[in-house]
Structures are given as C-alpha cells and as structure tokens.
Amino acid sequence: MRKFLVTSFFIVVSLLSFTNVYAKKTLNDATSALNTVSQKTGIDKGDLPSVIGDTVKMLFVAVGLLFFGLMVYAGVRWMTARDKAESVDKARNTMIAAVLGLIILLASYAVTVFIQNKIIGS
C-alpha cells in the first residue's frame, strides 16, 4: 500500500509540475531558436535542414551497420548449422529479413528524395 501511495504521489507531482516550453510557430522561428541553442553548446551548424540531414545520415549509417551485423550473424549461423535444416532455415530467414529491411530503407530514401526534388523543389 505504501509503495502504491509513493508511486501515486510522484505521478501526481510530475503531472502537475509545469516547465517552460519554448515552442516556435513557424519553421523560420525554429531555425533561429536552433541557432541560439547551438551557439551555447558549441555546435557550429545552425540551420535546421542541415541538422536534419546529418541526423538522417547517422540513421543510415546505423542501419547499414545493423544490416552488416545481421548478415554476418546469419552467415556464421548458416556455416555452423551442420546440415540441420532448422538452423539453415533460421539463418536464411534472417538474411531475407535483413535484405528486405535494407530494400525498404532504400525505397523510402528514394521516395523522399523524389518528393523533395520533383514536387517541393530544392
């Protein structure tokens, strides 16, 4: 009972505590706010599109490393299966899933670039 009361107290306090939110109305306002924050942290990039682009690049690198790791894992698993059909099937399914994930990622990137270049215009 005491644990429930303490948990309830912390939930109520966290829901009732207010903090300042520095939300901006337009994208241009967000860029100026990003410049202000980035100057305090020492980051030299201040425009929002470059920060988003760098974040997307990091995500692509992480997904590429994940794909590579899954392929190595599945390959090792396949080589050490020793004619066990179940292990070979699991390794093959892992490879297929990794390749499909990479194809979906590249397709989403292609659609995004197409929309940005053809419809929105850069």
Image (spheres, rainbow, N blue to C red):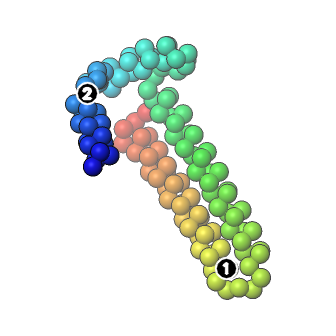
Q: Can residue 11 be seen in this view?
A: no
Q: Which residue matches tag 1?
A: 87
In the rendered view, tell whether residue 52 sits above or below residue 103. above
Quadrant in the rendering for residue 103: bottom right
| 67 relative position to 78: left or right | left
Quadrant in the rendering for residue 25: top left
In the rendered view, tell whether residue 44 sits above or below residue 95. above
The amino acid type, in three-letter code, at marker 1 is: Ser
Q: Can residue 108 be seen in this view?
A: yes
Nearer to the camera, 95 or 81: 81
The amino acid type, in three-letter code, at marker 2 is: Ser
Name the spot of residue 70 as percent of width and height, x first: 64, 61
Q: Residues within 10 Å of mark 2 (few under 14, many from 20)?
A: few
| 117 relative position to 13: left or right | right
What element does badge 2 sit on? loop
The tag earlier along the polypeptide, 1 or 2, is 2
Nearer to the camera, 67 or 49: 67
Name the spot of residue 59 as percent of width and height, x first: 54, 44
> In the drawing, what numbered circle is on residue 17?
2
Pointer 1 with pointer 2, Cβ within 8 A: no
**Gap between marks 1 and 2, in whole Å?**
53 Å
User: Image point 63% across, 80% down: which residue?
Assistant: 89
Figure quadrant of the C terminus = top left
User: Image point 64% across, 83% down: which residue?
Assistant: 86
Nearer to the camera, 58 or 21: 21
- Circle nearer the viewer, 1 or 2: 2
Name the spot of residue 109 as percent of width and height, x first: 49, 49
| 3 relative position to 103: left or right | left
What element does badge 1 sit on? helix
